[in-house]
Image: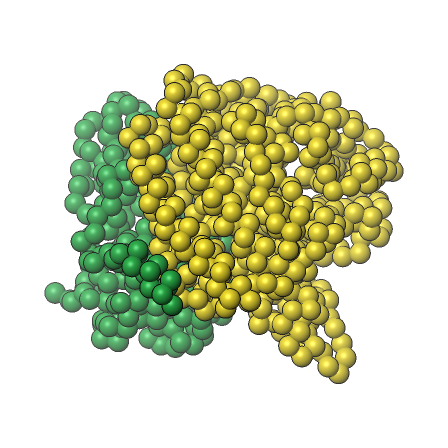
């Protein structure tokens, strides 16, 4: 007992006091910014070197889909014009799929549309949200970060947000991974077992678009195409702060 | 058989002898009969006009060598199985049977491995022939694929009498997303590298390094010593972070709240250092063939020394408490025993072997890069139980910390050279093998090129391929309620196995 107290005394305060204003070190690769400088004629280096298909070039204008981006930063490395940079902004989650497409000159953060939030989410889940997580082909990095959301540093539980063991006790499903064919049925059964009203959160580039595995023949992504998604949490994996802030923004939002 | 010393290696496909099935069979049996210093690294099948050319890669820990042999197995022509005489071959032969339809006359346990999309048998994942125990006292418990916690999917089928587990069978494959196929179809180094980092997120460094080495030998590139040293630091830091996290998870499973919270908090500065170093908490984006993208400069080395000093003090205090608390030790001791003979028979690798007295460790047996000069000493325990696995983790955290400090000091006195430019076509008709001792054990990558210098086959072996069977043995004759701590004490990979 005395030894336990002695150990406790060495810990100090571990919890981040305010997750909504917490920042990450400059080295963190978060939200990319594409400047509106003109590219060299017919240069497609960024697009050619992107490991996923996140980058599109239309009429010499570059855009980047954060839903497919794995935040590797290779495009910034190869661009001869230093047109693409990665900021340390971790506030990337949104309920608006189109907000994840970053256009040239877009320097403001990822926007969230309070008018798209279903009214039952704010009225029912405002101060308590229980989630069932399903890993459907995830590489375990997303799962580890979701577990970290509940540790003493990030302490998501203080907001009444928790992962639960049974879908029957859950208010929503958090999917990680590109949804493998072998996991697609179990994922659907789990979703069906959650009582209404229920929400869907896609976590990580794999879940949102298939990510690095988007073209794999071993996926079955019909579920994503046929259900309404309430929150997109991009990243590879998303930082715990990205996930927690995304949910807080969603359940605390008010329609305008 | 062709024997080669030193990994990673590249060997021309026509240098690997092609012998008759009978001769290959005898040769592999004779090789493995020598004993525990030898085990199977991998089995790879390549399409051949008459069927498949099966290449077997075997490793000898004492002579630091790897031996290869191959034979042509004709389609529809059943061949004898190596499994009855060498249980460790079971998973590789099952893979060949499932993926290519190779038939074995006497494989005792020919069951699906991962239900791949290119499966020969085209079986759905619900079609698995479970072993069943029948009788008045027996009952069956099925768990998964979705588990209570935030973890990956897999199905566990327990055959019990009362509270005791008689047999556990593990059905995997839910995580299959055809990583190997995607690596074969990838055309840029960037895409290959990100795929390698996504094989198992908790082994990002292990797999990224194995992949980088395979590409480096296929392009005849050599990394400079600074790059190699930095990779050692990354690999050992990954090991520390996972071991600390798992000690926390083990604490939670025996209801020791202080350990659960505090080990969890102690993992944070370790993975946050990756974030400071390369912008990602798992080290994604760091290792690329021929180079590391982010230098471990003097400023970062200083930050790392400071972080380790603070970490060490707290970790030592907490770990000492953990291993002296009767309530924790009593739950760990004697639980989930896998004996030395069992781990040797099933070909367990890495910490799943070292916890039961079998010192299998690539850093010592087949050292690569900077490990060649480091004279690695493995951490070995003998109990074979949860306590031994926890003790291996605790001691490996200390050992990795010492290793990192030595390498950090050496780095201060080294000056680098420019990173080589890695071409996008490779030496044709060649087979490359690389192996890395990641935190679970040996990660082995085998890349085979065609006549145009393109990758025709990319085969990955996560240590979990060997080690899942150790978990099944660990829970035998234990209460079913001990399954969680047994499972957590191994912490095997689903996605690394399912690929």
Give the x, y percent position of residue B277.
34, 36
* Colour of chain A in the image: green
Q: Is residue A199 visible?
A: no
- Rendered residue at 30%/56% (across/down): A11
Give the x, y percent position of residue A66.
31, 46
- Rendered residue at 40%/16% (across/down): B417
Locate the N terminus of chain B by quadrant: top right
Q: Is residue B339 visible?
A: yes
Taking the image as shown, residue B97 lies to the left or right of residue B279, namely right
Taking the image as shown, residue A134 lies to the left or right of residue B477, namely left
Q: Is residue B229 above or below residue A234?
A: above
Query: Which one is in front, A43 or B482?
Result: B482
Query: Which one is in front, B323 or A56?
Result: B323
Considering every residue shown, the one lying at the far left of the view is A256
Q: Is residue B444 above or below residue B315?
A: above
Q: How is the image coloured?
A: by chain
Query: Which one is in front, B179 or B451?
Result: B179
* Colour of chain B in the image: yellow
Q: Quadrant of residue A245?
A: bottom left
- Rendered residue at 36%/41% (across/down): B308
- Rendered residue at 73%/22% (across/down): B15
Give the x, y percent position of residue B152.
50, 58
Q: How many marks?
A: 0
Q: Quadrant of residue B303?
A: top left
Considering every residue shown, the one lying at the far bottom of the view is B136
Give the x, y percent position of residue B239.
48, 44
């Amino acid at each position: 007992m005395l030894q336990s107290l002695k150990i406790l005394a060495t810990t100090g305060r571990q919890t981040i006091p305010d997750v909504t204003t917490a920042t990450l070190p400059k080295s963190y690769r978060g939200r990319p910014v594409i400047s509106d400088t003109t590219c060299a004629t017919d240069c497609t280096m960024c697009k050619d070197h992107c490991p996923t298909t996140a980058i599109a070039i239309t009429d010499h204008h570059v855009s980047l889909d954060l839903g497919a981006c794995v935040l590797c930063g290779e495009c910034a490395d190869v661009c001869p014009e230093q047109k693409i940079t990665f900021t340390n902004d971790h506030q990337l989650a949104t309920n608006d799929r189109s907000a994840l497409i970053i256009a040239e000159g877009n320097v403001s953060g990822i926007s969230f549309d309070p008018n798209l939030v279903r009214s039952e989410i704010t009225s029912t889940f405002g101060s308590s949200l229980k989630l069932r997580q399903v890993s459907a082909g995830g590489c375990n990095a997303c799962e580890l970060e979701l577990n970290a959301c509940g540790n003493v540093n990030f302490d998501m539980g203080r907001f009444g947000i928790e992962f639960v063991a049974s879908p029957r006790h859950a208010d929503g499903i958090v999917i990680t991974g590109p949804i493998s064919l072998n996991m697609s049925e179990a994922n659907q059964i789990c979703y069906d077992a959650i009582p209404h009203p229920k929400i869907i959160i896609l976590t990580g580039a794999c879940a949102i678009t298939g990510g690095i595995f988007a073209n794999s023949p071993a996926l079955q992504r019909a579920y994503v195409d046929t259900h309404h998604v309430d929150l997109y949490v991009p990243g590879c994996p998303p930082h715990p702060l990205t996930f927690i802030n995304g949910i807080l923004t969603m359940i605390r939002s008010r329609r305008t | 058989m062709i024997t080669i010393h030193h990994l990673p290696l590249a060997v021309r496909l026509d240098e690997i002898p092609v012998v008759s099935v009978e001769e290959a069979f005898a040769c592999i049996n004779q090789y493995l009969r020598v004993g525990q210093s030898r085990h199977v690294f991998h089995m790879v099948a390549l399409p051949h006009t008459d069927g498949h050319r099966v290449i077997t890669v075997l490793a000898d820990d004492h002579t630091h060598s790897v031996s290869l042999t191959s034979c042509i197995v004709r389609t529809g022509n059943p061949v004898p199985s190596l499994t009855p005489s060498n249980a460790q071959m079971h998973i590789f032969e099952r893979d060949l049977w499932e993926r290519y339809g190779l038939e074995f006359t006497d494989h005792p346990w020919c069951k699906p491995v991962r239900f791949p999309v290119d499966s020969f048998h085209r079986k759905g994942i619900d079609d698995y022939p479970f072993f069943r125990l029948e009788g008045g006292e027996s009952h069956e418990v099925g768990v998964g694929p979705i588990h209570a916690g935030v973890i990956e999917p897999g199905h566990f089928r327990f055959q019990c009498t009362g509270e005791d587990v008689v047999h556990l069978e593990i059905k995997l494959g839910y995580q299959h997303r055809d990583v190997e196929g995607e690596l074969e179809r990838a055309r840029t180094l960037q895409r290959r590298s990100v795929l390698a980092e996504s094989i198992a997120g908790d082994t990002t460094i292990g797999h990224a390094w194995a992949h980088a080495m395979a590409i480096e030998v296929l392009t005849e590139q050599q990394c400079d010593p600074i790059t190699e040293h930095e990779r050692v630091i990354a690999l050992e830091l990954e090991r520390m972070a996972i071991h600390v996290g798992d000690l926390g998870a083990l604490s939670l499973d025996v209801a020791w709240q202080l350990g659960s919270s505090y080990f969890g908090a102690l993992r944070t500065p370790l993975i946050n250092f990756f974030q400071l170093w390369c912008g990602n908490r798992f080290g994604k984006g760091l290792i690329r063939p021929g180079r590391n993208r982010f230098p471990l400069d003097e400023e970062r080395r200083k930050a790392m020394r400071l972080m380790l000093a603070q970490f060490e003090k707290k970790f030592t205090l907490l770990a000492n408490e953990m291993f002296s608390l009767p309530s924790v030790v009593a739950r760990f001791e004697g639980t989930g025993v896998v004996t030395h003979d069992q781990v040797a028979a099933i070909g367990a690798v890495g910490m799943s072997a070292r916890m039961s007295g079998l010192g299998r460790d690539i850093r010592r047996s087949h050292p690569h890069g900077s490990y060649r000069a480091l004279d690695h000493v493995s951490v070995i325990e003998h109990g074979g139980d949860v306590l031994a696995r926890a003790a291996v983790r605790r001691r490996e955290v200390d050992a990795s910390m010492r290793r990192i400090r030595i390498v950090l000091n050496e780095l201060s006195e080294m000056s680098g050279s420019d990173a080589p430019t890695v071409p996008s076509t490779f030496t044709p008709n060649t087979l490359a093998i690389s192996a890395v001792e990641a935190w679970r054990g040996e990660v082995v990558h085998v890349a085979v090129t065609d006549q145009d210098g393109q990758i025709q086959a990319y085969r990955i072996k996560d240590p979990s391929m060997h080690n899942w069977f150790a978990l099944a043995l660990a829970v035998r004759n234990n209460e079913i309620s001990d399954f969680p701590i047994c499972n957590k004490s191994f912490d095997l990979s689903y996605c690394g196995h399912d690929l």
